[in-house]
Amino acid sequence: MGMSATDYRQMAQKLLPPGFAWSRNEADNITYFLQGLAESLARADSDISDIEKEIYPESALILIDEWEDALGLPECGLGGDDLAKRRLDAYAKDTAYGGLSQWYYVELATRAGFEVEIDEAYGHHCQSHCEAPLYHPKSGLAPVVYSAAPVERWATCNDSCLTPVRLFGDGRLECLLNTYKPAEGRFVFAYTEV
């Protein structure tokens, strides 16, 4: 708990030298001067105790913008105006260890508001039976991310032959997961229509 303006004023009055010029009466000009200084010091004391909360992103209020800038947030257009979500995102990114496991990417997508399932692709190995495929039928050796999304656009006759027949979602899920995947890895995204 910080000191009040009265505490600071009384402390300053005790430090005054003795004598008629340095009166300690409540109605004297020196007391009004010291009260003004004391109020400034009390505000600074209060601000210092409040700034302790700004050290951590999960409790930041004044410095939440600086935390987001330092951590590169919001990512892929997934930001919002909700302070609690901004704090959670900053805390999660600040304390994230990263990982290559399926649950890490599922949790990352869930926190961003996406419901996904990831099918890890295992290639043929020594314990596979002889008729097992060499690669995952949809993706080779890349994990398949299943999610539901609305159809954003159908291909038209004027589109390039490289344009997908249907485009799902707005690309934020792909952006998010591709940001956190290892450089040599890739995901294959499979959408079901909402």
Image: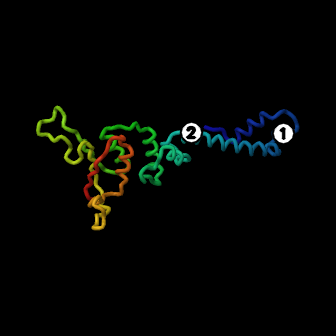
Residue flagged by tag 1: what amino acid is it?
Ser
Q: Position of residue 148 (x, y in %)?
A: 28, 55
Q: Position of residue 47 (x, y in %)?
A: 62, 43
Residue at image x 48%, y 50%? Answer: 83
13 and 87: which one is in front? Answer: 87
Q: Quadrant of the N terminus?
A: top right
State the image quarter where residue 101 is shown. Answer: top left
**Residue located 30% across and 62% down the image:** 160
Q: Is 65 on the left or on the right of 167, as rendered?
A: right
Query: Please, which residue is most extreme toward the front here?
Result: 161
Task: Report which residue position mark 1 lands on.
Answer: 23
Q: For the view shown, which residue lies furthest in the right direction?
A: 20
**Residue drawn at point x = 45 percent, y = 50 percent:** 74
- Residue tagged by mark 2? 52
Q: Residue 67, position in %: x, y?
A: 51, 44
Classify mark 1: helix, strand or loop: loop
Give the Cα separation between the discs numbered 1 and 2: 37 Å
Element at label 2: helix
**Image quarter (top left, top right, bottom left or bottom right) of the C terminus:** bottom left
Horizontal side, residue 1 vs residue 183: left or right = right
Q: Tell me the kind of residue under disc 2.
A: Glu
Which residue sits at x=43%, y=42%?
93
